[in-house]
Each structure stands twice: as C-alpha cells, then as structure tokens.
Amino acid sequence: MRSAFEAWAQRDGHIVRRREDKPDEYLVFETQRRWVIWQAALEHGKPPGGRKTAAQKEAAAAEKRAAEAVQRPPAINADEAAVRNQVLNEVLDAFSSLGGERGMDDILKVVQGLKRKQDQAIEPVAAKAPARQNA
C-alpha cells in the first residue's frame, strides 16, 4: 500500500523521503498529510488519488483536442456529391465567362444568375404538382 502511495506521490511531484527518527512518517508535512488522506480513503473504499492534478487535466484536454482534430468529416452520399459538383461547375463556368476583373460586381452577377437559374428550374416542377383541394 505504501509503495503505491509513494509512486503516486512522486508522479504528482511530492517528496517521499521519510524521517530518520520516525520511519513511518514523511519528512515533508504535505506528503505526510496526503499519506493520512490516502489511508482514510482506502478505509472508506474510495479510490486514492481520484483527484486529477492540473497537469493531468491539461493532458486529458490536449488528448481530447487531438482526437477531435483527427476525426474525419462525415461522408456524403452520392446524391449530395453530385449536387455539390454541379453547383461548383456552375459557379466556375459563371466566373470564367465574366473574366473576373471587377471583383464584387462579378460575384453579385454570378449569385444573381444562379438564383435565376434555380427559380427557373423550380417553376416547371411547381406547375406539374397537382393543386390541393380543400375537403
């Protein structure tokens, strides 16, 4: 039990040297106090060293951030990929036809042109849909 405590205390940065006149006590008061707390925790069935140090908390947070950074973006299905490619191609075609000399004016023209195309594509679909009748 004492060796487990000393290993934990050293990892936490405490001095685990014992007194020469009383080998059951530690030379540093804070280490002795933690030893008494450790023993009390064991008596009550609580895990000793359950509290994390600031370094352990920071290491856990860094590990969590690293795991989140490694996660891949969610995969998209074939339909979404086709729509994205179609939109990208339309935007590229619109910009290449303008020549790209005026900056924001060109961007506004592209956006307005795409909105017009979208509205024109929606109108035929709306005309084909049957009208709702109130019953």
Image (cartoon, grey):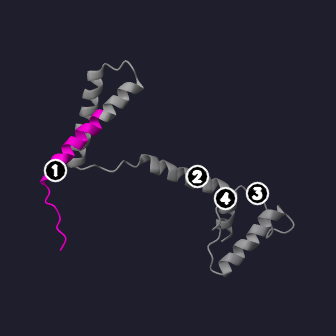
- Mark 3 vs 2, N-terminal side: 3
| The disc label shown at residue 53, or none | 4
- The 10 Å Cα crowd at callout 3, few under 14, some 14 to 19, many 20 or more, is some
Q: Identify which residue is drawn at 46% across, 50% down.
A: 68
For marks 1 and 4, give the CA distance.
Answer: 63 Å
Find disc 2 in the rendering and name its residue: 59
- Mark 4 vs 2, N-terminal side: 4
Q: Which of label 3 and label 2 is nearer to you?
A: 2
Q: Main secondary structure of the magenta part?
A: helix
Kind of residue indicated by mark 2: Ala
- Mark 1 vs 4, N-terminal side: 4
Q: Identify which residue is drawn at 79% across, 69% down.
A: 33
107 in relation to 53, above or below: above
Find disc 1 in the rendering and name its residue: 125
- The 10 Å Cα crowd at callout 4, few under 14, some 14 to 19, many 20 or more, is few
Find disc 3 in the rendering and name its residue: 15
Residue 2 in magenta? no
Which segment did they paint magenta? 113-135
Element assignment for label 2: helix
Q: Which of label 2 and label 1 is nearer to you?
A: 1
- The 10 Å Cα crowd at callout 1, few under 14, some 14 to 19, many 20 or more, is few
Element assignment for label 1: helix
Query: For this view, does 24 lie left or right of residue 8?
Result: right
Q: Identify which residue is drawn at 76% across, 73% down.
A: 36
Q: Position of residue 69 (x, y in %)?
A: 45, 46
